[in-house]
Image (cartoon, rainbow, N blue to C red):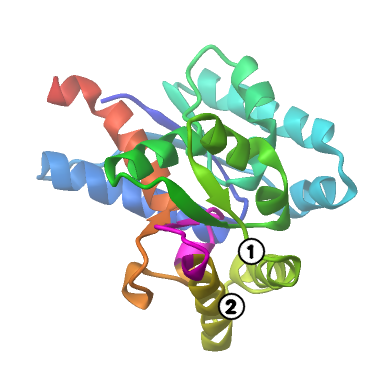
């Protein structure tokens, strides 16, 4: 079993989900008392968020790159950035280490391809919905990506940072998200990407008949597939 390196803490709420999902998947595949080999480095999210809000992506890239180096020195065989938004600096982080970085958009594309999805809605932080570090990678591989209108983007971003990242799961916010999903469905979306690792705390597949692609679940599964590749060979 290979060792999975997690850059977490962005927010710690969803990092808990990563840790749980990875260990559950390893146990399901191997049984007994098996659990995942994980090295977790949880960063200080307030520092990262301040870099985001003032546009200092170079500083956040430096922080995450140093973290990745620490994980590699600690024995990680693969690195995951446990957040969609900070994949904005994924190339810089990947270049800082010798071990591979599992990109959340690559894993998500593979999941969409298995379901033959061609047009998909994307929910996430305003950075993820407006910029191309996730959308662009999906579009390059032939997907049409739909995003909410600007007013809905602001609502989604606010719920993520002011509620989900601090552990508030409110039914009224769920209803607002589901209305946005319905709008995307009306525009022809064949599925919806929960493109922020906290959204899965609020929205589940049971809440909508549109196929849901939770990037936290997808990314965690990809990590387990990598870690256990030699076990299934």
Instruction: Specify whether residue 189 is painted magenta.
Output: yes
User: Is label 1 in a helix, a strand or a loop?
Assistant: loop
Q: Can residue 76 be seen in the rendering of this structure?
A: no
Is 138 on the left or on the right of 160, as rendered? left
Q: Earlier in the sequence, mark 2 or mark 1?
A: 1
- Image quarter hosting the C terminus: top left
Provide residue 172's location: percent of width, then percent of height.
Answer: 57, 88
User: Is label 2 in a helix, a strand or a loop?
Assistant: loop
Residue at position x 36%, y 35% in the image: 223
150, above or below 143, in the image: below
Q: In whole angstroms, how far apart are the C-alphas of marks 2 and 1?
A: 22 Å
57, above or below 47, in the image: above
Q: Which is closer to the viewer, label 2 or label 1?
A: 1
Q: Which residues are magenta?
A: 185-200
Residue at position x 77%, y 52% in the image: 49
Provide residue 129's location: percent of width, then percent of height.
Answer: 66, 53
Is 167 on the left or on the right of 106, as rendered? right
Residue at position x 57%, y 47% in the image: 83
Provide residue 179's location: percent of width, then percent of height.
Answer: 54, 79
Q: Check disc 2 and report the residue beneath it.
A: 168
Provide residue 40's location: percent of width, then percent of height.
Answer: 50, 39
The quadrant where residue 97 appears: top right
Identify the mark at residue 167; answer none if there is no mark. Answer: none
Is 50 on the left or on the right of 106, as rendered? right
């Amino acid at each position: 079993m290979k060792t999975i390196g997690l850059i977490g803490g962005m927010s710690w709420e969803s990092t808990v989900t990563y840790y749980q999902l990875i260990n559950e998947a390893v146990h399901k595949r191997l049984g007994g008392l098996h659990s995942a080999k994980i090295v977790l480095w949880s960063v200080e999210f307030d520092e990262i968020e301040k870099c985001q809000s003032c546009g200092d992506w170079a500083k956040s890239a430096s922080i995450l790159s140093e973290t990745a180096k620490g994980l590699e020195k600690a024995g990680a065989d693969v690195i995951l950035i446990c957040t969609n938004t900070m994949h904005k600096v994924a190339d810089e982080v990947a270049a800082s280490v010798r071990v591979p970085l599992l990109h959340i958009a690559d894993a998500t594309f593979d999941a969409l391809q298995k379901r033959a999805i061609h047009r998909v809605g994307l929910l996430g932080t305003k950075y993820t919905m407006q910029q191309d570090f996730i959308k662009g990678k999906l579009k390059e591989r032939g997907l049409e990506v739909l995003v909410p209108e600007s007013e809905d983007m602001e609502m989604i971003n606010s719920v993520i940072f002011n509620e989900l990242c601090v552990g508030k799961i409110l039914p009224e916010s769920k209803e607002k998200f589901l209305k946005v999903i319905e709008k995307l469905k009306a525009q022809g979306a064949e599925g919806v990407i929960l493109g922020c690792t906290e959204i899965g705390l609020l929205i589940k597949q049971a809440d909508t008949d549109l196929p849901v692609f939770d990037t936290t679940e997808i990314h965690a599964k990809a990590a387990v597939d990598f870690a256990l590749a030699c076990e299934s060979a």
